[in-house]
Image: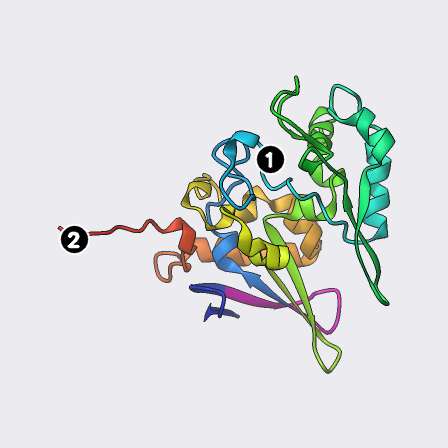
Amino acid sequence: MSRRDRTPAGPAREWVTFDDPVEEGRIWQIDVTFLMSSYRCIFGCGCQGIWTAPTPELGHGCCTYGAHFSDKADREHVVKVAKELSADEWQFAKVAKKKGIYEKVVEDEGDGPEWKTTIHKDACIFLNRLDFPAGAGCALHLHALNRGKHFSEYKPEVCWQVPLRRIDDEQDDGSVISRLTEFGRDGWGEGGEDFGWWCTEQPAAYTATEPVYQSMSVELRKMLGKRLHKQVVAYLEQRRKAAGALPPVAHPAAVPVKLGRKK
């Protein structure tokens, strides 16, 4: 069932709800507006970074603060991949051998420590900088490209998912509502409010020739599972064909704002 919803976080957008075809008791709310938008990552092509002021000259993208690992398995997987990287793929390979590739963030009672990738020279240790011969960007991403693999097989979970975000909300009756939406600045916690710029809010990032559900099909399949992904894509394809009768709610950042008197 599709619906148009106005959330407290911002303008109206359209959602569709699915029962999980595999896991009983889980319901999915899918952000139709973002998945049908023309968003694309513009790293190196206008990305302003996530400092408190725009800093495109640094070439950091969203790698400034490092990647928080989702769990121990995620961390250990990246540790294993890091051992495969060559010096011509990873600018700070030697540094990583001394400092390690991850560091503790905080430790909450009962939850155990939280870990993220090591910060070196004000950004993630895996971020190759502008002066690196192979170019700026994630060393893990470059490693995947060199091997003809999708980058989701090598990068930390959060890195290959952004700008997609899954939010699980367990209900009192034990059921779970999972929301698949965009990774807005709120996904970074309180620190996200300090960003001088964030890509999903910027018209410059909505210039792709295909919708997100097509350009990020690999990521969506991994996040939703094969069966649900197939159902979601079928629905979105139907929505595109029926756009003349009921256009999908446009993403607010993709709608140009025109000021002044109409002619």
Query: From the viewer's perspective, is residue 178 above or below residue 87?
Result: below
User: Badge 1 is on which residue?
Assistant: 60
Observer-nearest of 84 and 32: 84
Left or right for 117, reference 29: right
Q: Residues within 10 Å of mark 2 (few under 14, many from 20)?
A: few
Q: Position of residue 108 (x, y in %)?
A: 81, 63
**Residue type marked 1:** His
Count of numbered tags: 2
**239 relative to 6, above or below:** above
Q: Nearer the viewer, mark 1 or mark 2?
A: 1
Q: Is residue 59 among the parts visible in the rendering?
A: yes
Of residues 204 and 99, the one nearer the viewer is 99
Residue 233 visible at all: no
Q: Please report the bounds of the magenta region as a residue range.
A: 15-27
Q: Is residue 152 left or right of residue 248?
A: right
- The numbered disc on residue 262 is 2
Give left or right: position of 124 versus 187: right
Is residue 87 part of the magenta span, yes or no?
A: no
In the image, residue 7 sits, relative to residue 196, either above or below, namely below
